[in-house]
Image: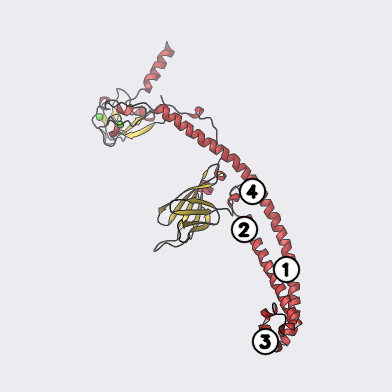
Amino acid sequence: VVLLLLLVLSAVEIQRPRGVPLSKRQFYEEGKPFTCLDGTRTIPFDRVNDDYCDCHDGSDEPGTAACPNGSFHCTNAGFRPAFIPSSRINDGICDCCDTTDEYNSGATCQNTCRELGRKEKESLQKMAEIAKEGFLLKQQIIQEAKRGLEDKKAKLADVQTSKKDLEDRVEALRIVKETAEQPEKEAKERHLKAWEGKLKCETISTSMDCTDHHLRDIIKARNEFDEAERALREVDDQIRNLEKEISFDFGPNAEFAYLYSQCYELSTSEYIYRLCPFNRVSQKPKYGGSETNLGTWGKWAGPEDNVYAMMKYEHGTGCWQGPNRSTMVKLTCGKETVVTSTSEPSRCEYLMEFISPAVCQEPPSLDFGAHEHEEL
Ligand SMILES: [Ca+2]
Ligand SMILES: [Ca+2]
């Protein structure tokens, strides 16, 4: 009997005036004077929800529309609790999915909380599945990035070795060239005319000047030297590019490395937007007209605790009487790598939404039933 009594008491305790959330029920004690939540006034309890506004903060009328600044709490069992402005109480429009805001208006509301809850659960589950698959893909991407990095390092070592060989070759050819040029310098006057016609020599072998074998040697030596030097410059470029790529910040596990030297496009009715990660963003009119640079790679620009959630591209084409164009790229988790939208939230500052598995986090759990919060 005592146990039963306790159960009844606790059931009674949960009772609260209409429109009061569970978290505030201790301020509304049945039969005891009520103090407005802002502390300005104390009134008898029967003036709570008497459809007359007594408290400046509206706290005495949580369940009626009497206070202009009041708010009404819907429990919405099966879905999510919500607050609505108290002006929406009994206004004939169903605002709370549990219908509790229309208790005295004659409006016929259907309780849609369970249905909404089910839909929300489904979409959360779908998102969690995407996150899970995305996260698996990310693991592959990380493995590939590791292999790619090792390949690049090996390539760099190779190129550095071949650079040494090339340098030796350039030096050797320089000596050949300079040796060949030496008599030419001495006899410069004599050969001046022939020298000016050197290009012709390569094609017109019958030309008198071109019968000069020595001149041919000089040209050959110079060409070979120039070619070797060009090859050396190319190797230098290759080394610079490899070093740049190897030292790039592609995220904690190099998960963004796969985006390097790729481009992704989004076609709208007017433009084709192009994102080349770590390089640049551009916009090109679909029906003619030149491309506009919306920014070149700047930096990772997400919030401090999630810096890899956002990329910043800056110093794009200048706006007329305005700043240079810039673009923020917001990354969200998904199975594919795709640009989903672009907008211009403020003038010349673009926002691009970009989906990539590289930002997927390990999903905590697919079991939503256990976490479902239902207030009864
Ligand atoms: Ca009142
Ligand atoms: Ca309503």
**Mark 1 lies on residue:** 167
Q: Residue 375 is drawn in which quadrant? A: top left
Residue flagged by tag 4: what amino acid is it?
Ala
Query: Which amino acid type corresponds to the residue marked 3 in the rendered image?
Result: Lys
Some atom of ligand 2 lies within 8 Å of the CB belonging to the residue at label 3: no
What residue is at 73 percent from the left and 61 percent from the top? 161
Of mark 1 and mark 2, the one earlier in the sequence is 1
Q: Is residue 263 left or right of residue 27?
A: right
Sequence-first tag of 2 and 3: 3
- Front residue (pair 289, 374): 289
Who comes first in sequence, dot 2 or dot 4?
4
Mark 2 residue type: Lys
The answer to whether residue 174 is above or below residue 309 is below
Q: CA distance from mark 2 to mark 4?
A: 15 Å
Circle on res. 145 = 4
Cβ–Cβ under 8 Å for marks 2 and 3? no
Query: Badge 3, how many Cα within 10 Å: few under 14, some, many 20+?
Result: few
Residue picked out by circle 3: 193
* Disc sitting over residue 244 in the figure: 2
Looking at the rendered structure, the kind of residue marked 1 is: Glu
Rounded to the nearest angstrom, the CA distance separating label 4 from label 1 is: 32 Å
- Element under disc 2: helix
Task: Identify the residue at horizontal 75%, vertical 84% (top origin).
Answer: 183
Q: Quadrant of the C terminus?
A: top left
Is 42 rendered above or below residue 178? Answer: above
Residue 362 makes an appearance in the image: no
